[in-house]
Image (cartoon, rainbow, N blue to C red):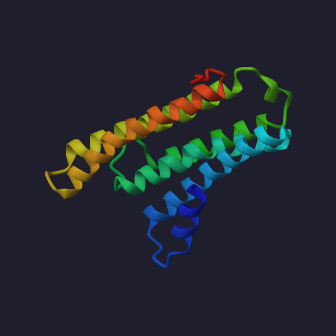
Amino acid sequence: VSLIIAISLIIYKKNDPVQLSFAALCLAIFVHKAGAFVHVVLGIEFFGLIENLGLISIPPLVIRFCRYFLKNRTLFSKDDIASTALFSLAIALIFFTPLYRFPYLSILLNLYIAYVIGLSYLSLIAYIRKIADSVEKRRMGYLAIAFPIAMLLSAFDFFYYYGFCMQL
């Protein structure tokens, strides 16, 4: 689904920065999830690397999308995109060293991403509080409700990923 969204937004003729940044984020999610799926199915370590590279590309793209979507009224500065991109690049270099086998690396990666996503959510809440009553404020309020629901559903995938699966 994320690949279809990304492709449709990219080929759409209007070069809206919000749509293009969302397309890039969707593409990163696709790379992460496709890598995870193929890694589990085939067991080839290369796809685990692809999965992790998709994962570490998410934080700078989340910040970029959040800044465009919330009209630069976020908790992130313009420099945060560059700093998270450099931090993600540093993490990518770790994948080519023996530190890649560090047992807590995936947990630290997920905490890094959760931190950025959490700040994005706080930015959304702050943005909603600052704007005047309007249709946009109501729609953003719906988004603020949907966001934690999506995170809760994603948590089930997270728990399954770390071996806490529920048998029905």
Residue 27 horizontal/vertical position (percent): 61, 56
Q: Position of residue 87 (x, y in %)?
A: 64, 39
Q: Quadrant of residue 94?
A: top right
Q: Quadrant of the C terminus?
A: top right
Left-right relation of 127 to 37: left
Residue drawn at point x = 56 percent, y = 56 percent: 1
Q: Nearer the viewer, residue 143 or 67?
A: 143
In screen coordinates, is 16 left or right of 109? left
* Left or right of 39 on screen, residue 31: left
Q: Residue at x 28, y 49 (%)?
A: 140
Q: Furthest residue to the left? A: 133
Farthest front residue?
Answer: 168
Across and down, in percent, residue 71 comes to 34, 56
Please say if 62 is above or below 104.
below
Q: Position of residue 88 (x, y in %)?
A: 65, 41
Residue placed at 31% from the left, 42% from the top? 144
Query: Quarter of the image holding residue 95?
Result: top right
Tally the marks.
0
